[in-house]
Structure formats: structure tokens, C-alpha cells
Image (cartoon, grey):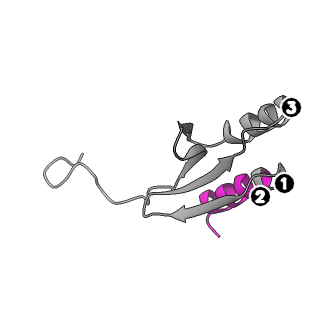
Amino acid sequence: MPASEARAENLAARLSALGLTTRMERRATYTSIEAEVPEALPAETWRAVLEVVAEADRFGLLASSLTGRTLWAVVGKAVPATGDVRGPGHQR
């Protein structure tokens, strides 16, 4: 398992352990983790949730009166190394 995927799995597991239901979506360049946040989430749990998502590459919270609150986090996948990225004629 690539390190980025292991990181994403770890973040999702830790959020689940805090009582949030998570879902993951794997894309070509990143993995996203989303969780619905209940209205009555204790302050101590919020602090723990923020500590977890702070380890992601990006995170945020979407809040709407229609859909509630959705926490999201993104873990980027490593870009594979290539040969000379400057192109032909630019080699030293």
C-alpha cells in the first residue's frame, strides 16, 4: 500500500474512532475523506477531530442549512518521478 493511501486510511480510521462516519474516495492524484459532523459534537471531540485533519494536506468544513456539516480532508498522492522534465535540448 502506498504511503499516501496508508495516511488516508489512518486519518479515516481515527475520525471513525471519534464517532464520525467517514467515506473515502480515491482519485488519480489524491484521496479524499469526508465525514458528516453532528450538531451536538462536544468541544473536546472537535479538538481531537481538528488534530486529526491537521495531518492531511488540505482540509475544510462545508456547512449548509440544507445538508448539515461535512468535514473533508485530502491526502495527495506522490507524483511519480520521470526522466528529464525540462524536455529535449535542455539537458546539461
The answer to if 2 sits in the magenta stretch is: yes
Question: In the rendered view of the protein, which quadrant contains the C terminus?
Answer: top left
User: Which is more toward the observer, 19 or 14?
Assistant: 19
Contact between marks 2 and 1 (CB within 8 A): the answer is: yes
Of the numbered discs 3 and 1, the one sitting upstream in the chain is 1
Could you say whether the residue bearing mark 2 is in a helix, strand or loop? helix
User: Which is more toward the observer, 6 or 53?
Assistant: 53
Question: In the rendered view of the protein, which quadrant contains the N terminus?
Answer: bottom right
In this figure, which residue is indicated by the disc labeled 3?
44
Crowding at label 2, few (<14), some or many (≥20) Cα neighbours within 10 Å? some
Could you say whether the residue bearing mark 3 is in a helix, strand or loop? helix
Q: Position of residue 36 (x, y in %)?
A: 65, 50
From this viewpoint, which residue is outermost toward the left? 89
Q: Which mark is residue 17?
A: 1
User: Which is more toward the observer, 26 or 16?
Assistant: 16
Q: Position of residue 5 (x, y in %)?
A: 62, 62
**Which residue is pictured at 67% across the width and 55% down the height?**
7
Task: Tell me where residue 12 sits by quadrant.
Answer: bottom right
Q: Position of residue 46 (x, y in %)?
A: 77, 34
Crowding at label 3, few (<14), some or many (≥20) Cα neighbours within 10 Å? few
Could you say whether the residue bearing mark 1 is in a helix, strand or loop? helix
Marks 3 and 1, how far apart at CA: 14 Å
In this figure, which residue is indicated by the disc labeled 2?
13
Marks 3 and 2, how far apart at CA: 18 Å
**Which residues are drawn in magenta?**
1-14
Q: Position of residue 23 (x, y in %)?
A: 63, 61
From this viewpoint, which residue is outermost toward the front? 66
**Which residue is pictured at 72% across the width and 44% down the height?**
38
